[in-house]
Amino acid sequence: MGETSARTHVVEAGGEGPLLVIHGGAGRRLHEMTAAQKAETDEALARALEAGYAVLEQGGPAEDAVIAAIHVMEDAPCFNCGRGAALTLGGRAELDAALMLGDGNVGAACGLTTAKHPIDVARAVMERTPHVLFSEPAAELLDEWGIEQVENDYFVTPARLAALEEWKALHETGDDHPETRHGTVGAVARDVRGHIAAGTSTGGITGQQPGRVGDSPLCGAGTYANGQTVAVSCTGTGETFIQEVAAYQVHARVSMAGEALPDAAAAMLAGVDARGGNGGVIVVPASGAGVVGFTDGAQMNYGWAHGDTRVTHE
Ligand code: ASP
């Protein structure tokens, strides 16, 4: 693990060959997680790694590994995506997701309120339409795409309702700790053929205005992949990641400025930090070790699988 600057931290992940790196969000928390919450998060990260890496071990494509890992996290209420997502000011879940492959194929959706696995909608947009991004696709369209749908209540957990109430109370006092409101999950993978893919799935930020969309579903901001360089998934204060065009910036630094991957990730995060944001990034390159990076003070849930090695950390 290296501390590339006083305000960003970068960890190398794995090496050549099939590689999966995942994150379960980064940010500062109002409260320390309890031992039980830590154990739950760790167990879910480990299951996501197993599900995703099994695909790579069987010779499956990078995008299938990304989706398998994200499915596990979308089902686990401890992450800000799918069930257990952060709630809007109106107490509802509005979910966003994106999937991008190294060959440039990309699909994304925002404002989802019934799709059990938002990452499946991203894939459907990529595979079944000539478009890149859908906002609030109609239930009939989701049916047509074979997307499993649930009532919005399915996503709403007691913990997230309590977090919303707590945030509202703090917000009234003007002390709302914006850096504590987010989470998000993501996965980046390289398969046995050397193809790479990136996916991100989120509930946004606690107490966001209905209709607000962050960086996660935006190609180049929260999610990006280019087969010549990197697959990237971000988490953090979405507005600052959009302003930094964060995921694309990592690609641009590597491909155009010739920066080493850890330096590129750290420099992008330094830009986020300079704008008053915080969060993290995971990157898998077309060859070599991946990278996990996060801003100073952010707690980052992440994991990676490579060969027989499995690492999870928070
Ligand atoms: N980046 C996400 C958003 O702004 C939130 C997060 O990563 O926690 O919607």
Image (cartoon, grey):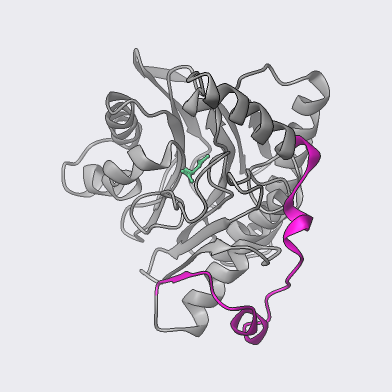
Quick one: which residue is furthest to the bottom in this view?
144
What is the magenta range? 132-159
For residue 306, side relative to residue 269 (left or right): right
Q: Residue at x 50, y 18 (%)?
A: 175
76 versus 261 height, above or below: below
Frontmost residue, 238 versus 185: 238
Magenta-drawn stretch contains 153: yes
300 versus 224 height, above or below: above
Quick one: which residue is furthest to the top in this view?
6
Q: Residue at x 78, y 57 (%)?
A: 154
For residue 117, side relative to residue 285 (left or right): right
Frontmost residue, 57 versus 243: 243
For residue 10, side relative to residue 136 (left or right): left
Magenta-drawn stretch contains 157: yes
114 versus 83 height, above or below: below
For residue 301, side relative to residue 221 (left or right): right
Q: Residue 161: x, y in percent?
A: 73, 39
Quick one: which residue is furthest to the right in this view?
36
